[in-house]
Image (spheres, rainbow, N blue to C red):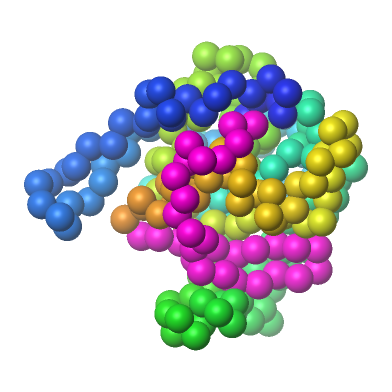
Amino acid sequence: RMTEERRPLLPSMASPPQILPANAGASSVLKLERQFPMYVLPLDEVELLERFVPHEDIIDKLVEWKPGLGDVLFVSHTWLGNSHPDPHGTKLKLVQRLVRRMQSKTSQSIEGHAIAVAWYGPKRVRVTAAAMRRCRYLWIDFLSVPQRNPAAQNLAIRSIFSYVHDAALFVVVAGPWKNEESGQWRDCRQWMRRGWCRLEMLANALSPSVKQVVLALLDLVEGIETLAHDAVAGGAGT
């Protein structure tokens, strides 16, 4: 993604990622056109990070994901700085704790939020321990999307639908934090209002297999059902 100050309006509003029905009929599966490779970081490398670094500085550690390589953890979040998403490493530490929990042999399933359980039933909103342990790679914008090449960055942004489509888990990292330049909150409520995050949630909602959303808040990690699928255009574009 571009910085908080310089991000353009969502490109999807003017020219959305191409979504073509594979077959006619209401049950057709969406075919998503990927315009830029899906670069992911092995979870073993996530543990070694001391700071999130831009795509170009970690390209030698990234893997181009292709079917059969292993499951991907897709992370959605808002930036805590205008030029860096995590200036003080707060999110990285939370992601690393989540990864350790997911990979632990003693990890337990993440149960759904009480409201979601009451509405949909526990099985539909549970993220199983087995599903978490199958994850081998991390996708997060700052690492996976070019930061210094606007043309390549735009292609990656237009490919977000396909990235979410191929991910196995969708994680929202949204703690009680503020953007250090603007002083504005970047908590879960603000995450739900951001245009970029709504785009990612919309991509999840349109995926043939919708991923349950895992909400990561400091030491609390709980499963929640997919949030209301508000129109992308209704959110802030930064």
Image position of 102 with respect to 76: above or below = below
Near-viewer residue (47 or 126): 126
User: Could you say where residue 31 lies in the image, as x and y percent from the top left?
Assistant: 26, 42
User: Could you say where residue 202 lies in the image, as x and y percent from the top left?
Assistant: 44, 48
What residue appears at the point 45 percent right and 81 percent down from the top-left corner?
A: 119
Image position of 52 with respect to 99: above or below = above
Near-viewer residue (64 or 34): 34
Image position of 235 with respect to 223: above or below = above
- Residue reaching furthest left? 24
Q: From where the camera sits, is residue 55 visible?
A: yes
**Residue 235, quarter of the rendered image:** top right
Left or right: residue 96 versus residue 215 is right
In the rendered structure, which segment of residues is drawn in magenta?
209-238
User: Could you say where residue 138 lies in the image, as x and y percent from the top left?
Assistant: 61, 49
User: Could you say where residue 26 lies in the image, as x and y percent from the top left?
Assistant: 15, 55
Figure quadrant of the N terminus: top right
Does the magenta portion include 52? no
What residue appears at the point 55 percent right and 24 percent down from the top-left corner?
A: 9
Figure quadrant of the C terminus: top right
Q: How many discs appear? A: 0
**Residue 96, quarter of the rendered image:** bottom right
What residue appears at the point 87 percent right and 39 percent down from the top-left corner?
A: 183
Image position of 204 with respect to 234: above or below = below
Q: From where the camera sits, is residue 105 visible?
A: no
Does the magenta portion include 231? yes
What residue appears at the point 48 percent right and 37 percent down from the top-left corner?
A: 233
